[in-house]
Image: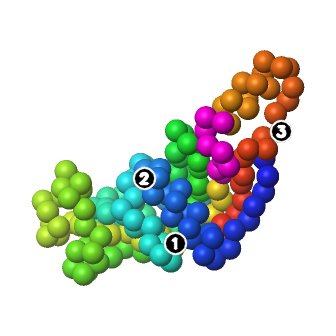
Amino acid sequence: MSTQNLTHLEAIRKIKELSEKAKICMFCTELETVPVNSRPMTLQETDDNGNLWFISSGTSNKNFEIKEDRRVQLFFMNNSDAQYLSVYGKASVYKDRETIEEKWSPLVKAWFDGKDDPNVTVIRVEPQETYYWDTKAGKLLSLFSFVTAAITGQKTNNSDGIEGNAII
């Protein structure tokens, strides 16, 4: 596995690519508590600045936890393509109509009485530290490499994998 650290625009592109492809992450709060509080959350969007956006209920525990400590950790997994992303950042909760209008998705109707529901909030996570794991050639070729190594008795060098920091 090779290391490739990315900066600014390359980092934003990689964060956007991996997070939007995975779409669902484990959203962790109260990072100093053991065990860490985590729950699955669906990403609404990763914007052109690398910020990650989610819709959440104002009455959810995560919103209360963010109010006390804005530090969050997100773990995205796209197992079908062997792509993974860890994002540590600061979360902000928005309740204003303009942000809700902009980020609203009909898919979240299952949790709210429409976008005018008073409990609708939007969470923005601004990445501070990110780390990614990806395959250069895709999962199928990586799998082939591992199977070939197992059959021939040779160790794989993971040369088809790439990992690194993505620094905005």
Name the element at disc 1: loop
Q: What element carries label 3?
A: loop
Q: In this view, does 152 lie to the left or right of 115?
A: right
Q: Residues within 10 Å of mark 1 (few under 14, many from 20)?
A: many
Query: Which marked residue is nearer to the observer: mark 3 or mark 1?
Result: 3
- Under circle 2, the secondary element is loop
Expressed as whole percent of the image width and height from the top left, the position of residue 123 reads: 38, 69
Q: Nearer the viewer, residue 49 or 150?
A: 150
Residue on which disc 3 sits: 157
Q: How crowded is mark 2: few (under 14 residues within 10 Å), some or many (20 or more)?
A: some
Q: Position of residue 42 (x, y in %)?
A: 37, 54
Q: Does the residue at mark 3 contact the one at mark 2 (Cβ under 8 Å)?
A: no
Stretch in magenta: 133-141
Residues at marks 3 and 1, CA–CA distance in whole angstroms = 32 Å
**Residue toward you, 26 or 82:** 82
Q: Position of residue 118 (x, y in %)?
A: 17, 69
The residue beneath circle 1 is 50
Q: Which amino acid does label 3 sit on?
A: Asn
What coloring was used for the rendering?
A: rainbow
Name which residue lies at 78% across and 21% down. 150
**For this view, does 56 lie left or right of residue 91?**
left
Q: Can residue 136 be spotted in the picture?
A: yes
Of labels 3 and 1, earlier in sequence is 1
Q: Earlier in the sequence, mark 1 or mark 2?
A: 2
**163 relative to 64, above or below:** above
Q: Mark 2 points at which residue?
A: 23
Label 3–label 1 contact, CB within 8 A: no
Which residue type carries mark 2? Lys
